[in-house]
Amino acid sequence: MKINKVISIFLLLFTTTLFAHKIAGVELEVKKIENDKIHINAFFKKSKRALAGNKIKLISMIDNRVLFEDKLSKKGLITNIPNESYWVYLIVRDNDVVKDGPAPNKGFKIEVKKEAKAFLYTSITSFIFIFISIILMFRNKKQKLEKSY
C-alpha cells in the first residue's frame, strides 16, 4: 500500500511537467507586421488588461543567445524579426511564458528543425507509470483477499 502512495505522488509530480512554460492567467501575443517586424503584447486573460514593465527576451534556438531584450509598454513592443529561429520569452515574476517567434518574409537564414519529442516521451512515461500503479493496486487487493480466507 505504501508503494502505491509513492508511485501516485511521483506520477502526479511527473505529469505536471507537461504544462511547463504556461502561466494560468497570462497570454503572450506575437503578431507579425509589415517590414519584417513583430508586435509583442501580453495581457491578463480575464480582464484583458495589458501587462506593462515586464521583460521580453528574444532568445536564439541555435545557441541560446539573447538576441533582443526590452520591457513591455502598455501598447506592446515592436521590434525587428531576427534572421535565425528564436523564442519569445515573457518574464512574469519568477515564471516565464515562451512562444516560438514568426519567421521573416524571406525565411530564416539559420533554422532549427523542431521535433515535439519531449511531450511525447513524457506522455508515454506517464502512461507507463499509471499502468504500473494500477497493476500494483490490483495485486495488493488480490493478496489481501487471499489473506482474509
Image: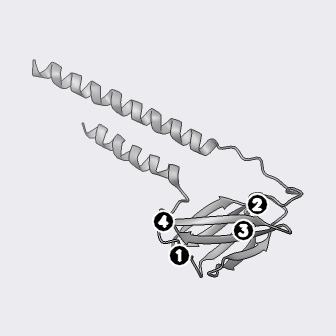
Dot 4 or dot 2: first in sequence order is: 4
Residue at left offset 84%, top offset 61%: 104
Q: State the SS at label 3.
A: strand
Q: CA distance from mark 3 to mark 1?
A: 23 Å
Q: Specify few, some or many for label 1: CA neighbours under 10 Å numbering under 14, 14-19, or 20 or more.
A: few
Residue identified by numbered label 4: 25
Q: CA distance from mark 2 to mark 3?
A: 12 Å
Residue type indicated by callout 2: Asp
Horizontal side of residue 119 vs 63, given as left or right = left
Instruction: Give the mark toward the camera: 4 or 2.
Output: 4
Q: CA distance from mark 3 to mark 4?
A: 22 Å
Q: Specify few, some or many for label 2: CA neighbours under 10 Å numbering under 14, 14-19, or 20 or more.
A: few
Q: Which mark is residue 102?
A: none
Horizontal side of residue 65 vs 125, given as left or right = right
Dot 1 or dot 2: first in sequence order is: 1
Residue type indicated by callout 3: Leu
Residue identified by numbered label 2: 63
Q: State the SS at label 1.
A: loop
Residue identified by numbered label 3: 58
Dot 3 or dot 1: first in sequence order is: 1
Q: State the SS at label 2.
A: loop
Q: Residue 43 at what x, y percent from top left?
A: 56, 71
Quadrant location of the N terminus in the rendered image? top left
Q: State the SS at label 4.
A: loop
Q: Residue 135 at what x, y percent from top left?
A: 34, 27
Q: CA distance from mark 4 to mark 2?
A: 30 Å
Residue identified by numbered label 1: 49
Q: Residue 139 at what x, y percent from top left?
A: 28, 25
Mark 4 touching mark 1, by CB under 8 A?
Answer: no
